[in-house]
Amino acid sequence: MNDTIIIAGAGQAGTQAAISLRDLGHAGRIVLVGDETDLPYQRPPLSKTYLKSGASPLPLRAEKIFIDKQIELLRDVSVVSIDRSKREVRLSSGQAENYAYLILALGGSNRRFPGDSDGILMLRTRSDADRIRERLSEPRRVVIIGAGFVGLEVASSLRGLGHKVTVVDIAPRVLARSVSVPTSNFVRSLHEENGVDLRCDAGSVSYKPLADGKAEVHITGEVLLADLVFAGIGIEPNVALAEAAGLETRNGIVVDEFLSTADPAIFAIGDCAAFRSVYADGLIRIESVQNAVDQAKFVAAVIMGNKQAPYRAVPWFWSDQHNVKLQIAGLSGGHDEAILRGNPEEKKFSVYCFKEGKCVAIESINAPADHMDARKLFAGNIPLTKQDFLEPDFSLKKFLVRNQPA
């Protein structure tokens, strides 16, 4: 009987799934297929310490771990097709492998800027970061398209290296899709204090390469000259492999509450998985280390037959910018009110986001205790109402103590 488990994708989700399967007692083969030549590594440092110092990204696991746990790590190889009827995948090496279960941890690819954008740099892999570093040997004028997390983290790193940085976005404010207005306003002020030129609500944005290797970025009413142009405008989930195999995709590979596709032998996890969450309406994808790790552990337990309630891990995120740490618990999408608690001038506060009177997310700046309490709040499924929050003596820590299940 075939007991091989194949994992397509050796990023955070795929690597965690392989380790968890072995730790939970899977005795058969585990084949981890990754399309990069490096050992699986941490990606968050790429926009931060790696850009600034060039220090190698930390490996997710030492090579010895893969050897000791008898995980077959295939590097510079990808899964190119799935034959569901045979439970077989074909690899880019030409090799065919049969599986008992297949885990798709395919991640995503950078969304390309429209038009002739070959000269625009992006960041997803170590080699992407190396290309950026190669262009930064002397002070440069950098235009960053996109005021999301990646764009702002790169802006922070490059300003720290002394480069002139302008960030443009058609959205009316920074992190417009990710955080509340109070947090967005603080982040904008933080970047401006550190010398970043921010141009939100920029109208149209277009790119024009010049013969000398420089480029122009055109926004409504202005032309910005750049030595280097970077785009951080999101990712597209890698779904082509699943689509070709006849699996449903909708801005991701659609999975059920146990992260299984319509084919019970195939799961999808991490950035490529579209799932229903108790923290959001409809199908969502979550691009975070937390989500990748939690979903990987969950699927490993499901495959090993451990009885599981439907997946409902608390979404949480972080971002480091200009020596300030932003942490978020919950999902603020669709919130209708945001109330700030603390002092932005001291660069330490939290913002409570409410939807129809119920707290759905808490955003914290340099307030790690608040963040940990927020995660406990959502993990415990403890409802926090606006009325509770507005009590004169409200403290999240005390509220948790009073409302812990008996």
Image: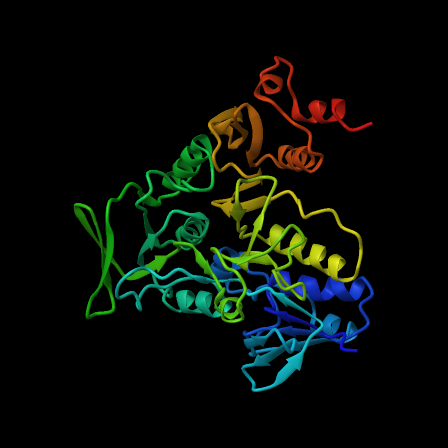
Residue furthest out toward the top: 392
Asked whether, in this view, residue 232 is left or right of residue 340, the answer is: left
Q: Is residue 404 visible?
A: yes
Residue located at (67% from left, 58% from top) = 296
Quadrant assignment for the N terminus: bottom right
Residue situated in front as seen by the camera: 3 or 290? 3
Up/down of 26 relative to 395, above or below: below
Instruction: Give the number of callouts.
Output: 0
Q: Give the image location of residue 71, x and y in percent.
A: 73, 74
Q: Is residue 37 visible?
A: no
Residue located at (70% from left, 23% from top) = 399
Q: Give the image location of residue 59, x and y in percent.
A: 63, 66
Residue situated in front as seen by the camera: 320 or 79? 79
Using the rendered view, name the quadrant where residue 214 is placed.
bottom left
Q: Give the image location of residue 215, x and y in percent.
A: 23, 62
Quadrant assignment for the C terminus: top right
Residue furthest out toward the bottom: 94
Asked whether, in this view, residue 392 is left or right of residue 406, the answer is: left
Up/down of 136 relative to 274, above or below: below
Up/down of 127 relative to 114, above or below: below
Residue furthest out toward the left: 221
Up/down of 326 relative to 84, above or below: above
Q: Give the image location of residue 144, x and y in percent.
A: 34, 53
Residue located at (67% from left, 53% from top) = 258
The colour scheme applied to this rendered structure is: rainbow
Using the rendered view, name the quadrant where residue 114 is placed.
bottom left
